[in-house]
Every structure is written in C-alpha cells, then in structure tokens.
Image: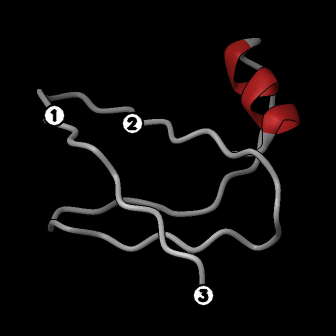
C-alpha cells in the first residue's frame, strides 16, 4: 500500500491494495509506480515473515 492507503487501513476506512492472497513462498510483488510502500501481512494463522529482497528492474 502507498502511504495514503496504509493510513486508511490503519483508520479502518476503505482502502485499495496491490497483491492478494498467497499460500506459497517466495512471492514476487511488483509495485505500479515509484513511491514508499508498506507491506502488510494480515493473517488468521501464524505467519513467518523474513527479510524481503528488493530488485530494481
């Protein structure tokens, strides 16, 4: 999420995001434009998140 959508998420308002549900690992997420992005992992079960690798295409 970009900063505006992330703030809406925190405020429990409507928000848009890029990505979706994944049940495999690793995953590749591509952002639609240059900006600061927030990665939100929202799960009902335990989730292990490791350091992400950033690539510049």
Disc nearer the start of the sequence (2/3): 2
Instruction: Give percent across and percent down for residue 6.
Output: 73, 30
Determine the secondary structure under disc 3. loop
Instruction: Give percent across and percent down for residue 52.
Output: 34, 52
- Asked if the residues shown at circle 3 and circle 1 are in contact, with their CB atoms under 8 angstroms apart, the answer is no
Q: Which mark is residue 47?
A: 1
> Which of 36 and 48 lies nearest the eye of the viewer?
36
> Which of 12 and 5 lies nearest the eye of the viewer?
5
Disc nearer the start of the sequence (3/1): 1
Give me the C-alpha separation between circle 1 and circle 2.
8 Å
- Asked if the residues shown at circle 1 and circle 2 are in contact, with their CB atoms under 8 angstroms apart, the answer is yes
Disc nearer the start of the sequence (1/2): 2
Determine the secondary structure under disc 1. loop
Q: Is residue 14 above or below residue 12?
A: below
Tell me: 28 left or right of 22: right
User: Which residue appears at 46% of the width and 61% of the height?
Assistant: 20
User: Which residue appears at 88% of the width and 34% of the height?
Assistant: 4
Task: Determine the residue located farthest toward the bottom in the rendered image.
Answer: 57
Determine the secondary structure under disc 2. loop
Task: Determine the residue located farthest toward the front in the rendered image.
Answer: 56
Q: Which mark is residue 3?
A: none
Give me the C-alpha separation between circle 3 and circle 1.
28 Å
Which one is in front in this view, the residue at disc 3 or the one at disc 1?
3
Q: Which mark is residue 41?
A: 2
Q: Which mark is residue 57?
A: 3
Neighbour tally class for label 3: few under 14, some 14-19, many 20 plus, Cα within 10 Å: few
Tell me: 17 left or right of 49: right
Instruction: Give percent across and percent down for residue 30.
Output: 57, 74
User: Which residue appears at 63% of the width and 61% of the height?
Assistant: 18
Tell me: 23 left or right of 20: left
């Amino acid at each position: 999420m970009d900063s505006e959508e992330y703030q809406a998420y925190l405020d429990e308002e409507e928000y848009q995001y890029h990505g979706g549900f994944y049940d495999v690992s690793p995953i590749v997420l591509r952002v639609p434009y240059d900006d600061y992005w927030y990665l939100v992992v929202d799960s009902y079960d335990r989730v292990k998140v490791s350091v992400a690798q950033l690539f510049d295409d």
